[in-house]
Image (cartoon, helix red, strand yellow):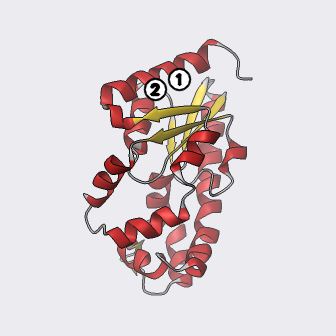
Amino acid sequence: MIVLGLTGSIGMGKSTTARMFAEAGVPVHDSDEAVHRLYAGEAAPLVEAAFPGVMDAGVVDRARLGERVLGNADALKRLEAIIHPLVRADADAFLAKHRNAGESVAVLDIPLLFETGGRARVDKVVVVTAPPEIQRQRVLARPGMTDEKLAAILARQVPDAEKRRQADFVIDTGQGLAAARAEVEAIIAELTSKPAC
């Protein structure tokens, strides 16, 4: 089974592209969705112990947690030390399940793939990109997003140009949904028509 890592900076259209892989029949593990599940489950007491007051009715309140960690490198490191191993275990279980089911390709949707050493866990990398003005427009349209928050997030991410340089495949979502879907289908066709090198 070929493990395809899907990544891209904030606002590049990664979630939409992940849905396109899923709609084409490729199993997709969404790291963000796994974090949501973990914040409502086994990670909640661990995060609350590290950051008292961020839990509400047994679930981590992401807004409260964000106030504590965004822009604070030490706090972010503490949070990542809790969350990353749990997300990785979740992804490993997902891969084992689909490998046993005989799937030929599975996608790991990892927002910080390059930043967290995720390159070693995948066979090929797809980077989703878009022109900077489209990225900025998409991100600033999100509720509660500000220029300052966007700057703090981008400061933690490997620059888009560097991600594209390291990618096996690049999908430009600035060209529209139909073009992105065609790219997804072309990647799937390439990966399933010959053995991975």
> Can I make out residue 173 in this image?
yes
Residue 88 locus on image (x, y percent): 63, 54
Q: Which of the 4 image quarters holds residue 149?
A: bottom left
Q: Amino acid at mark 2?
A: Val
| Residue at horizontal 49 percent and vertical 59 percent from the top | 35
74 vs 143: above or below: below
> Looking at the figure, which quarter contains the C terminus?
top right
Residue 83 locus on image (x, y percent): 58, 65
Check residue 156 in the rendering and tell me which mark sits there, or answer none: none
**Secondary structure category for the residue under label 2:** helix
Q: Which residue is mark 1?
A: 187
- The foreground one among 63 and 149 is 149
Label 1 Cα crowd, 10 Å radius (few <14 / some 14-19 / many 20+): some
| Residue at horizontal 38 percent and vertical 49 percent from the top | 132
Q: Which of the 4 image quarters holds residue 129?
A: top left
Q: Are marks 2 and 1 in contact (CB under 8 Å)?
A: yes
Residue 15 locus on image (x, y percent): 40, 44
Check residue 184 in the rendering and tell me which mark sits there, or answer none: 2
112 vs 182: above or below: below
- The foreground one among 37 and 21 is 21
Q: Is residue 141 left or right of residue 98?
A: left
Q: Amino acid at mark 1?
A: Ile
Disc 2/disc 1 C-alpha distance (Å): 5 Å
